[in-house]
Image (cartoon, grey):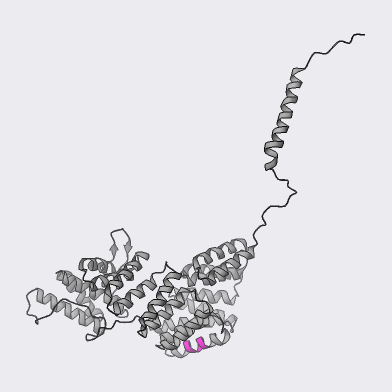
Amino acid sequence: MNKRRKPFNYFKIISLVVMIGVVMYFGVVIGPGVQSSFLPTPTATRSPESFVTEASQLFEDGKLPQAIQAYEQAVRVLPNDPAIYLALARAQVWAGKPKEAQTSAENALLLNNNNSMAHAVRGWALEAQRDFLNASTAIDKAIELDSKNALAHAYKAELLADQYLSGTGSLDVVARMSDESNLALSLGPDLLETHRARGYVLEATGNNEEAINEYNQAIAINKNIADVQVSIGRCYRALAVYDKAVNAFTIANQLNPSDPTPLLYISRVYATIGEFQKAEQYAQQAAKTSPADTALRGNLGVMYYRNLKWPQAADELSLAVNGGKDKEGVEIQPFELSPDSPRITEYFFTYGLVLTRLNRCGEALPIFQKILATTPNDEIATYNANEGIRLCGEAAGVTASPGSGTPEPTSGTPSSASAVTPTP
């Protein structure tokens, strides 16, 4: 009647306790953090089109660097859409990045080599790099594929205007660029680029008041494009409406602070009206924005000279004329003296005059002689070179006329104090 009791199996008891503990730990600690694969994701995946929408809005707001980034994101998620590459390319040209724009347009062409707009934008990017021959080929191809492509005709008008300004255009270039700009307007009256192209043609031919009207219509389409603000500022400067010129350049600088061009123009405006302290301040800001830019260093040297800061002027102008490294180790490439560039010539004769002021005539005289040999038809340059030679002669003990005073480079004809306005 008495059943024998089995002994306790302690191993099973311990194993069971451990298993119960593991289950409780998973349920309390791990389980709440694990989502079922059958539950929907808490955040919806962003649609590829939203990147394009965002980029377009950023472009309209004039935030070109951010627009470019958004278009690049759109390209990554929609790599087979040529329209996005072209929108990116256009933003890159407006932002002053024509080389990158050329690559973007060529990527669009890889997807469709018969895309008229892709050829047009590629030509625009090449034109911005001063590659007129290849730009013309690309734009002509765009027009061949679609004769009603308004942007292609606008880019063609700008190309012809630049050829006219550089002296490389055909004999009928003025008529051709006028026809192209008017055709572009008729095909695309509501486009920013067509009004900008027409304004540029008018500006190139000296019709600044009419150019301002076209630029204002472009601004009415999009007021946040720095390049158009710079263009209208140039026209106001040419008409001696200096307050409006400075205002336009200031807006351009606010829209695109990485571009030193508006600061350079403001510097030249203040120099024109004799406010050399302000001119120097803006010249310093421009050179700081792009320290390797030879033109900006030359301009800063001229402003130092105007403010009687001879050693600083000599340092900056030497970089423009001779090249070399500045105190921070930035490499600057020298300019070549050319009869086709009055502004570069100004850097040379101002450098010669400041060397004369510092009693360094041994360095100054070769510069003056080079000016006389290279730019004999430049009245301003030859006047200043001869004046520098005369002053060096006086310093060497040669008889000189009384009251010669401090050498001062002229900015107009020898009897004029008005500044030379660079071609747009």
424 or 24: which is nearer to us? 24
Which quadrant would the N terminus be assigned to in this image?
Answer: top right
395 or 248: which is nearer to us? 248
Question: Compared to 190, does 10 lie above or below?
Answer: above
**Secondary structure character of the magenta stretch overall:** helix
Give the residue furthest to the top. 1
Give the residue furthest to the right. 1
x 69%, y 41%: residue: 32
Q: State the image quarter where residue 2 is shown.
A: top right
Looking at the picture, how far across and down is residue 354, in whole percent? 20, 71
x 21%, y 66%: residue: 311
326 or 238: which is nearer to us? 238
- Res. 338 in view: no
Number of numbered discs visible in the structure rendering: 0
Q: Is residue 208 left or right of residue 112?
A: left
Which quadrant would the C terminus be assigned to in this image?
Answer: bottom left
Q: Which residues are magenta?
A: 176-182
Looking at the picture, how far across and down is residue 373, in whole percent? 22, 79
Q: Is residue 365 left or right of residue 115?
A: left
Looking at the picture, how far across and down is residue 259, in whole percent? 41, 69
Q: Is residue 361 left or right of residue 24?
A: left
- Res. 238 in view: yes
Q: State the image quarter where residue 362 is shown.
A: bottom left
* Magenta stretch encompasses residue 230: no
Question: Compared to 86, does 417 lie above or below?
Answer: below
